[in-house]
Amino acid sequence: MTGPTPDRPDPVSPADRPDPTHTTPPGDAGPAGDAGPTGSAGPPKDAGPAVAPTGRRSGLRNPEAAVRGLGAGTLGLEALVLLLAIQPIRVVGGHFGGAAIAATVALAVAAVLLAGLMRRRWAWSAGTVLQGLLLLAGLLHWSLFGLGVIFALVWAYALHVRRVILG
């Protein structure tokens, strides 16, 4: 269907439609001064009210929520990887003692808690500290240091995106 139906009103009101009795001569560009390729006048450039810039730096409807989601997703993924890495590290990586397992579980729990607290301004700093603690856990096992480097880089990128979007 292309036209209005009784259950769907016409989106353009009759007052907004051009007057069919008014025609522009073929060579006249009209008040806008810009004739199209066929010689007919196009819509005027100042057809609507001027829209002031809103000051937003991105096209996101809610940039703060988007950035919080990025941080929470990053920390959630980190917690999942830490928990899932325990068994393969124990099997392949050699001696992975109780202290290393406890540190890994504690870091995963801290990451989940911080993911839930991303509304707080300090949570971003705490997330950065968490990355440092994961790097320090590398003293307990070399694979934790490897995961720490990877997630520190991911966290640094999340901080960069936050700075670009929020300013």
Image: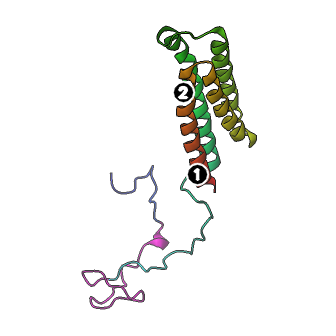
Q: Position of residue 94 (x, y in %)?
A: 51, 10
Check residue 29 for magenta coloring: yes
**Does 7 sit above or below residue 53?**
above
**Does 131 sit above or below residue 64?**
above
Q: Secondary structure at mark 2?
A: helix
Other-residue count near label 2 (Cα within 10 Å), few / some / many at <14 / 14–19 / ≥20 = many
**Does 82 sit above or below residue 47?**
above
Q: Amino acid at mark 2?
A: Leu
Q: Which residue is mark 2?
A: 147
- Stretch of the chain drawn in magenta: 13-40
Q: Is residue 127 left or right of residue 17?
A: right
Q: Which residue is mark 1?
A: 61
Q: Secondary structure at mark 1?
A: loop
Quadrant housing residue 38: bottom left
Of residues 90 and 121, the one nearer the viewer is: 90
Q: Position of residue 44 (x, y in %)?
A: 43, 80
Q: Residue at image x 27%, y 88%?
A: 26
Q: Position of residue 159 (x, y in %)?
A: 61, 45
Check residue 39 for magenta coloring: yes
